[in-house]
Structures are given as structure tokens and as C-alpha cells.
Amino acid sequence: MSVDQATVRRIARLARIAVTDEEVPHLMGELNAMLSFVEQLGEVDVTGVEPMTSVTPMAMKKRVDQVSDGGYPETVTGNAPMTEDHYFLVPKVVE
Amino acid sequence: MTDLTHMTLADARDALKAKKISSVELTQAHIAAVEAARPLGAYVLETPDQARAMAQASDEKIAKGEAGPLEGIPLGIKDLYATKGVRTTACSNILANFVPQYESTVSSQLWRDGAVMLGKLSNDEFAMGSSNESSSFGPVASPWTPPNWSAENAKAALSGDKKGLLVPGGSSGGSASAVAAGLCLGATATDTGGSIRQPAAFTGTVGIKPTYGRCSRWGIVAFASSLDQAGPIARTVRDTAIMLRSMAGHDAKDTTSVDRAVPDYEAAIGRSVKGMKIGIPKEYRVEGMSAEIDALWTKGADMLRAAGAEIVEISLPHTKYALPAYYIVAPAEASSNLARYDGVRYGLRVPGKDITEMYEKTRAAGFGPEVRRRIMIGTYVLSAGYYDAYYVRAQQIRTLIKQDFEKAYASGVDAVLTPATPSPAFGIGEKSGADPVEMYLNDVFTVTVNMAGLPGLAVPAGLSSDGLPLGLQLIGRPFDEETLFSLGEVIEQAAGRTKLPEAWWA
């Protein structure tokens, strides 16, 4: 399988990464090199093989559903590019 | 002072304990060495004041007889580990000004045990790479020089674009370069597909990727969560064993960390390997493998045989599919993990006319080409219509790779011996062509271990005909790092410790 320029733009959109017109052909070449490399996986018979979900067999750990940390909003928002009154600021999303 | 920076971690520990040296003088010698080696680019941030204060505190503890297992030992920390109040960037522009408000579990355990932090070490951006060339701080040079280069040639290249100098490997290139150059007694590193073992092999140092779940991943910048593991790089097998004991252990903050006791790994050094069965997987004799690597591998098997181990040929039939399967699983997980860098809660933000444009511009400006490429391929293989064909199939193949190892271990094999890399170190700028797969092939021998969650140790075993270090890899049963340390010690003793380069850069 290989990707065309329209697919490259669609993937970039899904990944939320802006790409310029000049970058698209270059990216297409790189992505197709990777896709052609992984193509050989098609020759493996995987009938009845469980897909791996956990490399170390272990029971999922659970914890009590209660607050265990917090109460320091300055610290939490300390690295944010834009904040106001301990809220993260983003461009308007609802009209 | 040079002597202090070329001691083994174990010798420094013993000398500190015996009060033959102080941590302040040991640390000061390293601070000076780090400053003199700035052109190598191993450190992306130096923390000399913090180092001196920690060393002072260590000396006081030693005086009071309260020394921890790593008391007063100066270490470097890969810039993927969050360090409280100390800038942590993952060597990406998207985190260029990120100052964590918390400490990673693994580094906090090193400080708990008395270690001293010298600074943060370079790596490939988000640990994606095998040469340390994708770091936002620029490439890191290996202290090893290319064959037939004079110190003058090397110094001239170092003050320019570094082209032609050797890569230290990656992604933990800063860690490996710093350890090999005497800029710390040991360093933390991380390994997702070979990022501890390949740089160790390229620089004549020792590195271990422990079993998945042995070390907590909490506070380490995530790349591919089902493959990432923390581990040490140091100058001897014993030194890595000492460091791993402090780094390992259960952490409630990482649900994949395993709740089992941490052994005294150092006690495994020198243990007899007599009667151990060592598997030589025939599938690792890959097409086009150099005669030199093949000879090194045979030499390694001979060393273990001479120590009383039994060498048997084994088959790991799905080996050749590990690398392509990895290049589906790892980018898929990366695309998900790196979704958090959106310009809202931390990191770079580039304004846009609406929130989507802000995301897109922020991520285009913040991520370098390799990271962007991997996010995009990961996004593609997880997208509607391709998920089963790519992602599910890759995870099925991962099961088969793990079963290959399980069968070998069930047949009585105690560990597996392979080459660590298909070649010695290459030059900076040499593999930056249009085909990213060329670089990926560096990890052909190491990536299987991450896919199967097993421990893997890289140990220097000799030099190439050009005089560059070559390493062997030992792969163990889950949570049997001790056997790897015993076997690694045998190879280190038989091969003789690699003589590391003199400080031509200073």
C-alpha cells in the first residue's frame, strides 16, 4: 500500500500538524518508504494469533477512586503558555 | 584530576566510603571535565551549583556514616527524565522552556541513594533516532574519532558542523558520549528499540535495558509506552549493576511497574556461569552481515564456553519481522502519546485564527522532521480502515516474537547471545538521506528485545579493524537481569576493558 498527496494532507490534518505545499511530496516519499518497509508483514500467517495487549503478564492494578493529590493550581498551570485565574486559556471554541 | 573522572563508579564509591577522596573533589573534577568537553555537545544543561551542593551534603552523610549506596557519585541524566526545577526538553523545541514541577521516580531514587546530578544529557528528539542527530540542540560527537583522523582534524570538525566525526549512537547518545568521555561516572538512559544498547556498543560502554516493568516510567517523557524502559549506561558491567539496583523497583504511579523485590545485582558479578546454556539464534546471521561482526560473535561464544557455559544453536523464526512490526507499534503509540503537545497546558504555542490552527501551527513548529514523520505514520496505521491491516497485525506478530523467545527459554536456554549492532559507529551526516529506513536498520538486533519485553545487556567485546568499539548483546529471561550481569562480566573480563579515548577535545 502507498499514500498519495491527498492522503498525506489528510493524515497531517488528523495529526494536527500543519504542512506546506512544498513539504507534501517529500513527506509522501518518506511515508511510502516506511510503508513499503512494513509490507513484508503481510507474508506472516497470523491466523488465530492473539494480538499482544500486555508484554508482561499481570493483572491490571486498581486503586481506590478518590482524590490522592492536588490543591496547587499555580504549580499545575506553571508551565502553561497562557493562563488566567488558574485556567488554561485557548482560542474561542464556542460561538 | 583526570584520574577522578576515569575511575569506575565502583572504585569511586569505595574510595568515598574509605574517605580517600571527597565527593566535592570528585564532583569538581567532573564539573571541570564537562566544561572542557562542551564542544562534544553531550550535556544540554549543566547544573554545577546543584552538583556542588549535593556533593557537600553527601560528604556530610559519609562523615556521619549515613552513606547511601550511591553516596557522592556524580551522574548525568538523560533529558527525557523530568527533574524538578531543572529544565527538561526531551531535546525538542516543543518543550524548549519546560521546567518540571516534579521529579521522575527513577531519578528520585538515585538522589535518595545519594547520587549527585551534573546536568542533563542530549538525546534524539523524543528519543526517536539512532544517532543523536535529531536533538534540537544539534548532533553529539562521540569521543571516539574516525579511523586515521588526527586530534587536530577532529578538533577542527568539532568547532565546525561536526560532519565526519562519529555519532555516539542514539537515542541515548549524550549519555553514552558523556560516559565514554569521562564526563560522569554513569548516566541514565532509556531504550524503546535499542536506545541504550546501540549507543553503548558504539562508544565502548556498557548499557542494560531491563525487563519491561522493572523500572518505573513515571516522569520520563513517553515515546512508546509499551516498549519504553529506563536503564543505565556506565563504563563497566559492575557499574551498571550498581546503578540498576537504585533505579529499579515498584512504583504505584506507574501501573505497568512490577511489584517484585529488587535483587542486589552487584552480587551477580563474578558468579559462575558454568553449565549455563547460551542460545545462538541463527536468524541473527542476517544477510550482508560483516565478517568482522560474525567473528566477534563467535569470539563472544568462545569466551562464554571457556567459562563453562554450553553454546547451543536456537531458532527465533520471527526475528526478521520485529523491525517492521516495531515501525508500526512504536509510531502508533508515539502518535497517541505526543497528542498532549498541543500548546495549551505546557510547551510551545504558536497562535492561530482558531484552536485547530493553533494546534497545527504549534505542532508544525515544535516537532522536528523525524518526530513529525513518526507521528504521521502512527496516525495513518491507527486510522479508520487501516487499523486491522497494520496495527492489529503488528501486535499479532509481536505475540509470535515473544513466543519464539518463550520456546527457547522453555527448552532450557538461560540467555541468548547476539551482536549488539550490525556495524561500528558511522559518521555524523552519513545516514541522513531520503530513506529513513536506512537509519532504522541499526536497531535490527536490539528491537526484538523491546517487542518481547525482555532484558538486554550490551557489553564491549573488542574493536573493529578500524579500531572502533564493537559490542555484543545478551538477552535474558524476564526479570533475570542477574544472569546477564554474570555473563556480561565474563565477556568483559575475557575481552579486557575497552581503553577509552584520551581527551583530544579539551
Image: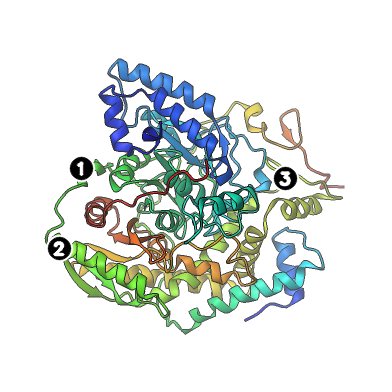
Q: Mark 3 belongs to which subunit?
A: B
Estimate the spatial distance between the alpha carbons at disc 1 and disc 2, rounded to whole Å.
22 Å
Relative to B46, say whether B274 is above or below: below
Please identify the quadrant where the N terminus of chain B is shown: top left
Q: Secondary structure at mark 1?
A: helix
Left or right: B293 in relation to B335? left
Q: Secondary structure at mark 2?
A: helix
User: The disc labelled 2 sits on which kind of residue?
Assistant: Ala
| Residue B446 image position (x, y, % from top left) | 41, 63
Disc nearer the start of the sequence (1/2): 1
- Residue B28 versus residue B9: which sits nearer the camera? B28
The mark found on residue B306 in the picture is 2
Disc nearer the start of the sequence (1/3): 1
Q: Residues within 10 Å of mark 1 (few under 14, many from 20)?
A: some
- Residue A43 versus residue B307: which sits nearer the camera? B307
Residue plotted at (52% across, 57% down): B167
Report which residue position mark 1 lands on: B267
Can residue B409 be seen at all in this image of the molecule? no
| Residue B449 image position (x, y, % from top left) | 38, 62
Q: Residues within 10 Å of mark 2 (few under 14, many from 20)?
A: few
Residue plotted at (37% across, 32% down): B4
Residue plotted at (58% across, 79% down): A36
User: The disc labelled 1 sits on which kind of residue?
Assistant: Ala
Estimate the spatial distance between the alpha carbons at disc 2 and disc 3, rounded to whole Å.
58 Å
Q: Quadrant of residue B47?
A: top right
Q: Nearer the viewer, mark 1 or mark 2?
A: 2
Are discs 1 and 3 located on one and the same chain?
yes
Are discs 1 and 2 located on one and the same chain?
yes
Report which residue position mark 3 lands on: B343
